[in-house]
Amino acid sequence: MNLPSTVPTEAYLVLSAILFGIGAMGVMLRKSALTMFMSVELMLNAVNLSFVAFARHFGRLDGQIIVFFVMAVAAAEVAVGLAIIVDIFRSRRSVDIDDVNWLRG
Amino acid sequence: MEFVVFAVFAAISVTAALFMVLQRNAMYSALFLVLNFFCFAVFFILLGAYFLAVVQVAVYAGAIMVLMLFVIMLLNVAYPEPLDKVLGFLRPFGVVTAVVFAVVLAGVGLASKMGDNASILPTIADPSSGAGIMLKGVGAAEAGHVQEVAATLFSRYLFPFEVTSVLLLAAILGASVLVRKRAEHA
């Protein structure tokens, strides 16, 4: 069995797809808003991985720059999202999304 | 060698991701996610994106996960989460959907191996078609060095970079407004 010297881009794409799928499964299966949040982070990271893989594949830096922006947006998203979760917890004493089925607070 | 490292860390990251999703204690989920973020940093190094690998550890594994763990401890929700109260019978469909989704995405990634072409991915970017910056005289392994990333970020992507600062300011304001004590709530 001879291994290629460098990892092909396709391998990274497949790994990225698997991790994205696991993240999507987490969003669909979990009932805790916090864990769903972490699953979304996993999906974002899986997409970042394919961005960087394509950046190497095409020999361009643009993919890496986009990942940089995705990280900045993810940081902003986590700050606001966790604030919303804390707010929900204050009014309902729970972060279970099954308890959050009303639009009014 | 590179392939061995990739295979080992791919196995670790997929296992950690599965544990994260299937773990019913939010605290353990968060710790498995940190392990996953470190695996991503290793992949970034393998892909030559050294700057992003450092940012991955500092921002994701550092800042974002500390915030996440802080909220888990603050709300004290690390106990095993209760099972579904509504629509619990739809649970298997979630797994099936996710697996089909991953298989389709992976199939697209692997499509090159099944087709007659060697690869559906063009190996050399056509400079006339894309709007990206071609790396001239820079080896692929050096593409992620801070110098090149900074040169691109502060020239071509200067405007998005500045917009990011407005976004972060809006996030700070939004988070402060959301968690402040309200008279009618307290």
Image: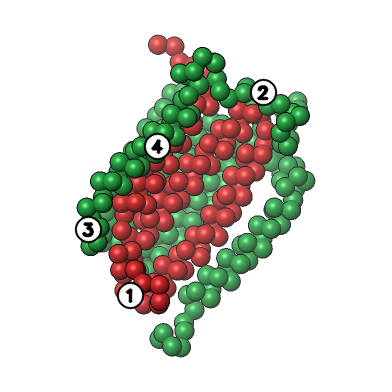
**Do discs 1 and 3 belong to a common subunit?**
no
Amino acid type of disc 1? Arg
Q: Residue at x 31, y 58 (%)?
A: A31
**Is disc 1 surrounded by few (<14), some (14 to 19) or many (20+) residues within 10 Å?**
few
In the picture of the structure, the residue carrying the numbered disc 3 is B83
**Is disc 2 surrounded by few (<14), some (14 to 19) or many (20+) residues within 10 Å?**
few
Amino acid type of disc 4? Ala
Q: CA distance from mark 1 to mark 3?
A: 18 Å
Measured along the vertical axis of the image, is residue B55 above or below residue B72? above
Q: Residue at x 51, y 65 (%)?
A: A80
Q: Secondary structure at mark 1?
A: helix
What tint does the image give chain B? green
Q: CA distance from mark 1 to mark 2?
A: 55 Å
Instruction: Depth check: give the residue in front, B69 or B178.
Output: B178
Q: Secondary structure at mark 4?
A: helix
Q: CA distance from mark 4 to mark 2?
A: 27 Å
Residue B102 is labelled as 4
Q: Secondary structure at mark 3?
A: loop
Residue A92 is labelled as 1
The mark that comes first in sequence, 3 or 2, is 3
What tint does the image give chain A? red
Measured along the vertical axis of the image, is residue B87 above or below residue B36? below
Please state the chain letter of the residue tagged with numbered disc 4 in the rendered image: B
Amino acid type of disc 2? Ile
